[in-house]
Image (cartoon, helix red, strand yellow):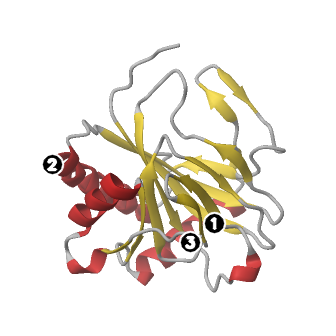
Amino acid sequence: MPALPEVDAANGTAAAAIAEALTSHGACRIAGLFAPAQMAALRTDLQRLRGDGALRPASIGHDAIRNLRPDIRGDSMLWLHDPRCGDAARDFIAVLDGLRSALNRSLYLGLQDVEAHYAAYPAGNGYARHRDRFRDDDARVLSWVTYLNDDWRETDGGALRLYAEQGCVDVLPQSGTSVCFLSELEHEVLPALRERLSIAAWLRRTGTTGS
């Protein structure tokens, strides 16, 4: 199984390295962009919101055509722009927005905003193979996932499976790991043996609709 390019964000050249990896492979794994304390704050915020009942079952579809299909998608979620989210969520969006601007300078993608949500997958749940870019709206250009799971082991399952040009790649959802990939790439979330916590995000442009 091929491996994704690894980007060390701690050396200050994350945007350039991510841009190079996206051009050559369509995806990369990023470490060091968020400090352990930031990961802990995000995890605590998500667990608080889940305990308060703020998360809701995630739907599939787009705009007016949305359906709950737990057989396809089994997570519960809350958008990070929701006022119930804490400072950690707002800081996360600010980091990705800065990265959005830097990637625009490198790749000229026309990225204009960031959307993101917390996601909690109960044990045994996943998300069937799909694309993040909708058939009738190409606003989503880059997809981003950051994992919030402490002490995750390979035997826990729950990998993100990317169907890249170089072949199928599995990424374990370990805390501190982020993945960036083209939103047109097919991918799935494999079921896990324990609860799986993450943030899913998209760097977007003004979309155009089509058939």
**Tag 3 residue:** 148
> What is the number of the mark on residue 103?
none
Task: Count residues near mark 1 (Cα–Cα under 10 Å), then give few for <14, some for 14-19, many for 20+.
Answer: many
Q: In whole angstroms, how far apart are the C-alphas of marks 3 and 2? A: 29 Å
Q: Residue at x 33, y 27 (%)?
A: 206
Q: In whole angstroms, how far apart are the C-alphas of marks 1 and 3? A: 5 Å
- Report x, y in % for residue 178: 46, 67
Residue 89, placed above or below residue 192: above
As shown in the figure, which amino acid type bears the numbered disc 2?
Arg
Q: Please report whichever mark, 1 or 2, sits nearer to the chain's N-terminal start.
A: 2
Nearer to us of marks 1 and 2 is 2
Judging from the image, what secondary structure is the residue with disc 3 in?
A: loop
**Tag 1 residue:** 197
Question: Pointer 1 and pointer 3: residues touching (CB < 8 Å)?
Answer: yes
**Tag 2 residue:** 105
Question: Pointer 1 and pointer 2: residues touching (CB < 8 Å)?
Answer: no
As shown in the figure, which amino acid type bears the numbered disc 1?
Leu
Task: Count residues near mark 2 (Cα–Cα under 10 Å), then give few for <14, some for 14-19, many for 20+.
Answer: some
